[in-house]
Amino acid sequence: MRTKFLTFFKLILMLVLLLFVAEGCVLSGSMYVREPPPAVRVEERSEPPHPKAVWVPGYWRWAGGGYAWVPGHWEAKPRGAEWVPGYWRETPRGYHWVKGHWR
């Protein structure tokens, strides 16, 4: 009985590990994706809603089984700040999303 339980436990553990490898691995809050992102889309911008609005470009987000486009939008610019766009960084473990932020 114990041998069957250990065999079943090992099988479940291997399946869980396979899922992490297939979809990207999540370690300490970071996700790595083996598949490179598609080319960035060229977006048409609407008129800015006000003079201090800054365009935050769209980007490809990993959605578990593939990439999904997140459209760009206008944001109010904080005083003295500038927008630093996010990007996918290629690493030996796969592609890692570096989130855009105000600096």
Image (spheres, grey):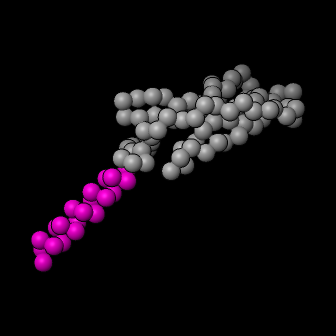
> In this picture, is 16 found above or below 2?
above
Q: Which residues are magenta?
A: 1-20
The rendered magenta stretch, by its main secondary structure, is classed as: helix
- Is residue 11 in the magenta section? yes
In this view, the residue in front, 83 or 6, is 6
In the picture, the quarter occupied by the N terminus is bottom left
- Is residue 82 in the magenta section? no
Q: Is residue 13 left or right of residue 48?
A: left
The quarter of the displayed image where residue 45 is located: top right
> In this picture, is 75 found above or below 24?
above
The picture places residue 95, in percent across and down from the top left corner, at 46, 34
Q: Residue at x 39, y 45 (%)?
A: 25
| One can see residue 51 in this view | yes
The picture places residue 35, in percent across and down from the top left corner, at 47, 38
In the picture, the quarter occupied by the C terminus is top right
Q: How many marks?
A: 0
In this view, the residue in front, 39 or 80, is 39
The picture places residue 39, in percent across and down from the top left corner, at 60, 31
Q: Residue at x 50, y 50 (%)?
A: 64
Residue furthest to the bottom: 1
The quarter of the displayed image where residue 4 is located: bottom left
Q: Is residue 79 left or right of residue 69?
A: right
Q: Residue at x 82, y 27 (%)?
A: 52
Q: Residue at x 24, y 63 (%)?
A: 11
Q: Is residue 57 left or right of residue 91?
A: right
